[in-house]
Image (cartoon, rainbow, N blue to C red):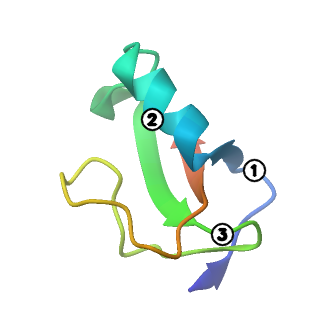
């Protein structure tokens, strides 16, 4: 786990899922990592198809 940089956009996990379902975000738009309120796992990729880890409450998003 790593601290989340100030320039990341943070989404509550359920809000992130809703935004993806509505096609507000696609893989081409940027990168996202599963996170808590203060740390993210840079090895977790929200686009790789694996379910969110149980500890994840947020997504740290980095726009291109």
Q: Residue 21: which numbered mark, if any?
A: none
Which of the two labelled residues, at mark 2 and mark 3, occupies the earlier sequence position? 2
Which of the two labelled residues, at mark 2 and mark 1, occupies the earlier sequence position? 1
Secondary structure of residue under mark 1 = loop
Q: CA distance from mark 3 to mark 1?
A: 16 Å
Mark 1: few, some, or many residues within 10 Å (few <14, many ≥20)?
Answer: few
Q: Which residue is mark 2?
A: 17
Q: CA distance from mark 2 to mark 3?
A: 15 Å
**Relative to 62, residue 19 above or below:** above
Q: Which residue is mark 3?
A: 36
Residue 10 can be seen, yes or no: yes
Residue 26 image position (x, y, % from top left) = 33, 26
Residue 61 image position (x, y, % from top left) = 57, 46
Task: Name the image quarter holding the N terminus.
Answer: bottom right
Quarter residue 36 falls in:
bottom right
Q: For the point 76% across and 72% down, which residue is it?
A: 38
Q: Which residue is mark 1?
A: 7
In the figure, is residue 21 to the left or right of 61?
left
Q: CA distance from mark 2 to mark 1?
A: 21 Å
Which of the two labelled residues, at mark 3 and mark 1, occupies the earlier sequence position? 1
Q: Are marks 2 and 3 in contact (CB under 8 Å)?
A: no
Q: Work out whether residue 1 or residue 58 is closer to the camera in this orientation and state it.
A: 58
Q: For the point 73% across and 64% down, which residue is it?
A: 5
Residue 14 image position (x, y, % from top left) = 55, 40
**In the image, which is nearer the foreground, mark 2 or mark 1?**
2
Quarter residue 44 falls in:
bottom left
Q: Work out whether residue 34 or residue 61 is closer to the camera in this orientation and state it.
A: 34
**Relative to 38, residue 17 above or below:** above
In the figure, is residue 8 to the left or right of 28?
right
Mark 2: few, some, or many residues within 10 Å (few <14, many ≥20)?
Answer: some
Residue 64 can be seen, yes or no: no
**Relative to 58, residue 24 above or below:** above
């Amino acid at each position: 786990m790593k601290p989340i940089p100030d320039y990341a956009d943070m989404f509550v996990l359920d809000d992130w899922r809703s935004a993806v379902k509505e096609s507000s975000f696609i893989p081409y738009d940027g990168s996202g990592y599963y996170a808590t309120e203060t740390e993210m796992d840079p090895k977790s990729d929200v686009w790789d198809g694996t379910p969110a880890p149980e500890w994840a409450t947020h997504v740290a998003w980095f726009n291109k």
